[in-house]
Structure formats: C-alpha cells, structure tokens
Amino acid sequence: MGNQEEAPGRDTEIREHLANERTLLSWVRTGVGLISIGLVVERAGALATTAGVKVGSTNASELFGLALAVLGVLTLVIGTVQFLRTRRRISAGVFVPSAAAYLVIVAGSLALAGAFIVYVLFT
C-alpha cells in the first residue's frame, strides 16, 4: 500500500495539472481585482456626488466602474473555460497552445484604458 510505483509520465502529468491550477488562481485573482477596482471606481463617483465635489461626470464613473466589473467577470469565465479545456488536454496528452483567451482580456483592458485616457483628456 505505501510503496506504489507510479507510471513513468505520471509525475509530469501531475506537475502540469498543478501548473494549470496555479494559472486558474491567477485568472481568479485578476478577475476579482478588476471587479473590486470597478466597484471602487463606481462608488467613488457616487461619493463625489454626495460630497458635492464636481469631478467629471458621475455617469462616466458608473460606466467605467461597470465596464471594469464586466471585464472582471469575463476574466473569471474565460479563465475557468481555459482551465477546464487545458485540464482535458493534459489528461488526453495533447498540447495545443492558445493565446485567444489572453488576447480578449488584453484587448478589453487596452480599450478601457484608451477610453479613460480620451475621457480625461477631453472633459
């Protein structure tokens, strides 16, 4: 019972599954961070309105906050799908690199950053 031998490639497969889980945790950390920042941005606009401080548009704060939260949720969904897909591929012994999931999040982040810069410069 205590001294069972593993198949030769089993250690490699275990390491790949553990790396896949660490990658999922990174996706989760990023998604939760984006959602948290989105909530802070949205609440900052409401707080500024309550305090009577005029800083741009409250609607813009709500819009950017919501967009960040949506991007965070999208990050969680894409990360989970990527994790499950990679898990199946590891078990099947097939490696197919895919950058599409990463590009969606990067493109969304760049679009939000660009919109924010345009908003700051022209308001």
Image (cartoon, rainbow, N blue to C red):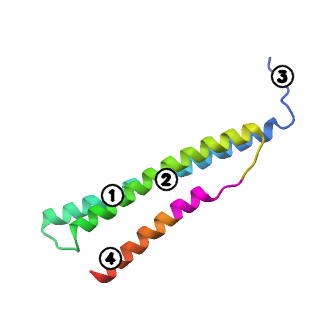
Rounded to the nearest angstrom, the CA distance separating label 4 from label 2 is 24 Å
Q: Which residue sits at x=49%, y=47%?
A: 77
Q: Which residue sits at x=25%, y=58%?
A: 43
Quadrant hosting residue 3: top right
Tell me where residue 60 appears, x and y as whole percent: 27, 68
Q: Nearer the viewer, residue 9 or 71?
A: 71
Residue picked out by circle 3: 3
Mark found first going from the N terminus, 2 or 1: 1
Q: Residue type at mark 3?
A: Asn
Mark found first going from the N terminus, 4 or 1: 1
Rounded to the nearest angstrom, the CA distance separating label 1 from label 3 is 54 Å
Quadrant hosting residue 20: top right
Dominant SS type (magenta): helix
Rounded to the nearest angstrom, the CA distance separating label 3 from label 2 is 42 Å
Residue picked out by circle 2: 75
Residue 104 included in the magenta stretch of the image: yes
| Secondary structure found at label 3 | loop
Mark found first going from the N terminus, 4 or 2: 2
Rounded to the nearest angstrom, the CA distance separating label 4 from label 3 is 65 Å
Tell me where residue 15 appears, x and y as whole percent: 73, 42
Q: Residue type at mark 4?
A: Tyr
Name the mark on residue 57. Answer: none
Query: Is residue 21 rendered to the left or right of residue 12?
Result: left
Q: Nearer the viewer, residue 61 or 103?
A: 103
Residue picked out by circle 4: 119
Residue picked out by circle 1: 66
Magenta stretch bounds: 97-106
